[in-house]
Image: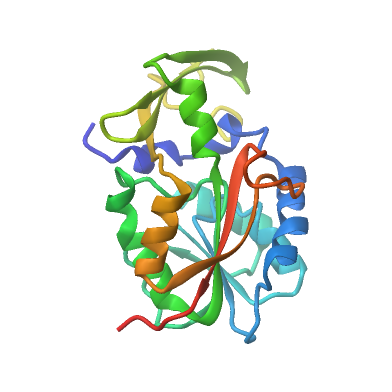
């Protein structure tokens, strides 16, 4: 199988795998974000970059904001369409956004919708594209796991295994951290409990199941700030949780960058 992991991982099974990341969590996120920075300071649309099945986009729509959702996954975009109805949805790659420069007042990269393309330096193209489509004074909201905590938890080349059963599938996840490439890897194995059953919305797996390895970049705040700054973005707000914890104390890094310079 030669597909990149993110072309496999974000299939119809994804909402089952991450069912605990639900609408209630998304509501907490959207209580916090407008307190950190305005979504639409100049009246331009908001882009949900990596919108998935639309659980965050739904709150933008309900708030009456002009918005667009973009994702590479056709199955997740179909779920988003069912959830949102007429909200604008675009299938595309975040490394090459087909939008005019300065088209958006805010770009949202929520629930770690970033860092998929190798070590941090290899994700600079995404930051460049975010900066290009942001209006001057617009904001990029980056919601990421707390990399320092993850390195502490997974350090020493340990592997952490979690097994569970959800919605007719057996799930095995093995997490580890690699110091060689500064990435967190998660081996995911999904097997249907009923091997004779066909793939359905309730059991969205092929008969042979799925196996793939997620890989997400790990970085320091200084590294992320420097890369953002190189593309005309300055960090202006932050939080360590959706409840507003101090950045150093929370489980997440919620970082807000403002576009201060127009890219040439």
Residue at 36 percent across and 60 percent down: it is 227
Q: Is residue 13 visible?
A: no
Image: 87 above or below 137: above
Frontmost residue, 198 versus 24: 24
Frontmost residue, 55 versus 32: 32
Q: Is residue 178 visible?
A: yes
Image: 162 above or below 204: above
Quarter of the figure that contains the C terminus: bottom left
User: Residue 235: x, y in percent?
Assistant: 53, 64
Q: In the orientation shown, which residue stands out farthest toward the bottom?
A: 42
Determine whether, in the image, residue 137 is placed left or right of residue 102.
right
Q: Quadrant of residue 162?
A: top right
Q: In the orientation shown, which residue stands out farthest toward the left?
A: 2
User: Residue 3: x, y in percent?
Assistant: 26, 39
Residue at 50 percent across and 30 percent down: it is 150
Residue at 42 percent across and 72 percent down: it is 131
Quarter of the figure that contains the N terminus: top left
How many numbered circles does the render carry? 0
Question: How did the renderer colour the structure?
Answer: rainbow
Q: Quadrant of residue 16?
A: top right
User: Residue 135: x, y in percent?
Assistant: 50, 82
Determine whether, in the image, residue 54 is placed left or right of residue 204.
right
User: Residue 178: x, y in percent?
Assistant: 33, 27
């Amino acid at each position: 199988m030669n597909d990149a992991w993110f072309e496999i991982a974000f299939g119809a099974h994804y909402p089952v795998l991450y069912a605990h990341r639900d609408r209630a969590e998304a509501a907490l996120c959207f209580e916090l974000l407008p307190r950190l920075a305005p979504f639409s300071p100049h009246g331009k649309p908001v882009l949900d970059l990596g919108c998935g099945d639309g659980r965050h986009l739904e709150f933008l729509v309900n708030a009456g904001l002009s918005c667009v959702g973009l994702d590479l996954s056709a199955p997740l975009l179909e779920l988003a369409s069912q959830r949102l109805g007429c909200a604008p949805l675009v299938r595309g790659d975040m490394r090459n956004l087909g939008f005019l420069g300065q088209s958006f007042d805010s770009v949202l990269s929520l629930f770690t919708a970033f860092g998929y393309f190798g070590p941090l330096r290899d994700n600079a193209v995404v930051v460049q594209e975010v900066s290009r489509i942001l209006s001057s004074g617009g904001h990029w909201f980056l919601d990421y796991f707390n990399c320092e905590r993850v390195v502490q938890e997974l350090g020493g080349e340990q592997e952490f295994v979690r097994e569970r059963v959800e919605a007719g599938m057996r799930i095995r996840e093995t997490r580890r951290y690699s110091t060689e490439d500064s990435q967190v890897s998660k081996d995911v194995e999904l097997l249907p409990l009923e091997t004779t059953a066909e793939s359905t919305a309730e059991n969205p797996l092929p008969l042979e199941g799925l196996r793939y390895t997620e890989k997400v970049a790990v970085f320091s705040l200084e590294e992320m700030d420097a890369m953002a700054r190189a593309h005309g973005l300055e960090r202006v707000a932050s939080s360590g949780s959706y409840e507003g914890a101090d950045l150093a104390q929370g489980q997440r890094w919620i970082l807000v960058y403002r576009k201060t310079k127009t890219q040439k």
